[in-house]
Each structure stands twice: as C-alpha cells, then as structure tokens.
Image: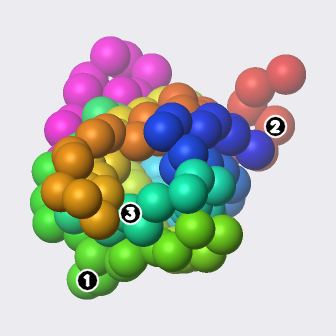
Amino acid sequence: MSDTTTNGIRIQVKTQFLPDRSSPGDDQYVFAYHIKISNLGREIAQLISRHWIITDAQGLVQEVRGMGVVGAQPTLQPGEKFEYTSGASIATPVGTMRGTYQMVAADGTRFEATIPQFTLSVPRVLH
C-alpha cells in the first residue's frame, strides 16, 4: 500500500490487476485502484480536481485531469474520510501512477495533496 500525508490530507492506495478486463495479446492491462482520503488536519477541506500521471514500462506517459473523483467533490471535516475505487489501463504488465488532488480549505486557501507513486503490476511479474 502507498501512503502519504500532505497538509493534513492522508492518501492511501491499494491496487489490483483485473485479468478479466485485460487483453495481454492486445497490450491492454487493466488495473483497479482503491483510494482512501483522510482529513487528519484541523480544517475542513474539499477535493476540487485531480491530476494523474500514468507511466507504463516503455515510458509512455498519460496525463489525466478532471473535476473531482468518481463524479464527486467530497468535503471532508476533520477526522472524516472518503473512499473510492477507479481504474486505469496501460499497454505493459507493469507501470506506475502518481499525482495530486487539488484541494480547497474552508477559508478558501487552495493546496495540492500528493498522491504517492504506486505500482501497477500483473501478479508475479515483479520479484
């Protein structure tokens, strides 16, 4: 599990390879990732948007930007958490993802919460 905290926002990530949605013969490897966002700070914070950098083993980089996550822009009170699952597809059996969530505090201060780099890997490919 990848785990990091920025400005009181803790982000934890777990991944899973989805063989039933993948097609290795067509260079398509699909992964699910489960994210838990916890507000460990003292201020209310809202997730406004996201920026992902997805890199496969050949160095091909995909950047994804969008509003919110899974159709939501969750507001987290101190001590609250928000969890969701989404997915990514890459052309190799191994890759990485990292990024940021753009957050806004109750006083209007904007900041970025770091999404720690994590590995996308077909089981038994990496030692």
Question: Residue 26: horizontal and vertical position, in percent?
Answer: 35, 50
The alpha-carbon separation of the residues under discs 1 and 3 comes to 17 Å
Of residues 125 and 120, the one nearer the viewer is 120
Question: Residue 5: horizontal and vertical position, in percent?
Answer: 60, 38
- Residue at 36%, 28% in the rendered image: 55
Q: Secondary structure at mark 2?
A: loop
Q: Residues within 10 Å of mark 2 (few under 14, many from 20)?
A: few
Of residues 126 and 66, the one nearer the viewer is 66
Callout 1 amino acid: Gly
Callout 2 amino acid: Arg
The alpha-carbon separation of the residues under discs 3 and 2 comes to 39 Å
Q: Earlier in the sequence, mark 1 or mark 3?
A: 3
- Residue at 81%, 37% in the rendered image: 124
Callout 3 amino acid: Ala
What residue sits right under mark 2 in the picture? Answer: 124
Q: Quadrant of residue 78?
A: bottom right
Q: Which residues are magenta?
A: 55-64
- What label sits on residue 45 in the rendered view? 3
Nearer to us: label 2 or label 1: 1
- What label sits on residue 71 in the rendered view? 1
Is 63 part of what is drawn in magenta? yes
Vertical relation: 125 (above or below) 25:
above
Is 59 part of what is drawn in magenta? yes
Query: On the picture, is 42 further left or further right than 64?
Result: right
